[in-house]
Amino acid sequence: MFNESRLREIASSLAAEQSYFAKWDINYLQAFIRDGGNCQYCERYLFEDYDVASCGDHLLPRKSYPELIKNVHNLVACCTECNQIKRDFDPAKNDPGDLGNEEYRKRIVEKAKNHVKTIGAKRNWRAMFDDARAAFEKKVHQYRGINSGAAK
Ligand SMILES: [Zn+2]
C-alpha cells in the first residue's frame, strides 16, 4: 500500500541527515526510496556507484504531462542509459488512467519497461557512446590546437 505522507517523511529525514541528498529533488528522492534504488526499466541497482544520477525518469513525459512533473507517482528511479532510450515515449498513450491507482501504474511501468527493452535491443548504445566519445575527444583536440595557436 502506497503511503504518500509517510514516504515524504522518510525522504525528508534522509535529505536532512545526509548532505549527499541535500540537493536532490524531494519528489525524486521519494521515488528512489519507493523503487528501492533500482532502475525501473533495467533493474540495475543505482547506488553501486557513488555518482548516482538523481535525474530518474518521468514515466509520462514532461512535454505532454506538465501537470505531473512533480507528481511522485509519475517519477521513477531510472539509470541514465534507460532514460536516454525512453526519452519522450508515452506509455499511457491509448491507455489513459490515474497513476495513483496501483494496478494501472504497474501496467504503465511495465509498458515503459518493454519499450526501453525493445528500443535498447535494436540500438547498440555502446557503439553510439564510443562514436560520441571519439567525436568529443576530436573536438577537445581541435579546441586545444586553436587555443594554443592563439596564445603564441
Ligand atoms: Zn536502466
Image (tube, helix red, strand yellow):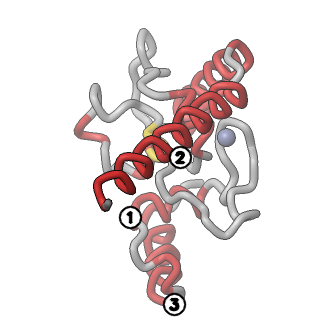
Q: Amino acid at mark 3?
A: Glu
Q: Amino acid at mark 1?
A: Asp
Q: Which residue is located at x 63 percent, y 54 percent?
A: 35
Quarter of the figure that contains the C terminus: bottom left
Q: Secondary structure at mark 3?
A: helix
In this rendering, is residue 127 above or below 67?
above
In this rendering, is residue 111 above or below 32?
above
Question: With 75 as the anchor, is 132 left or right in this view?
Answer: right
**Image quadrant in which you'd find residue 148:** bottom left
Relative depth, front residue between 150 and 69: 150
**Image quadrant in which you'd find residue 4:** bottom left
Residue 142 in percent (x, y) is at: 45, 41
Q: Which residue is mark 3?
A: 17
- In space, the residues marked 2 and 1 are separated at their CA atoms by 12 Å
Mark 2 and mark 3 lie on one chain; the one further toward the N terminus is 3
- In space, the residues marked 1 and 3 are separated at their CA atoms by 15 Å
User: Can I make out residue 56 in this image?
Assistant: yes
Q: Which residue is mark 1?
A: 25
User: Can I make out residue 103 in this image?
Assistant: no
Mark 3 is surrounded, within 10 Å at the Cα level, by few (under 14), some (14 to 19) or many (20 or more) other residues, namely few
Q: Which residue is mark 2?
A: 76
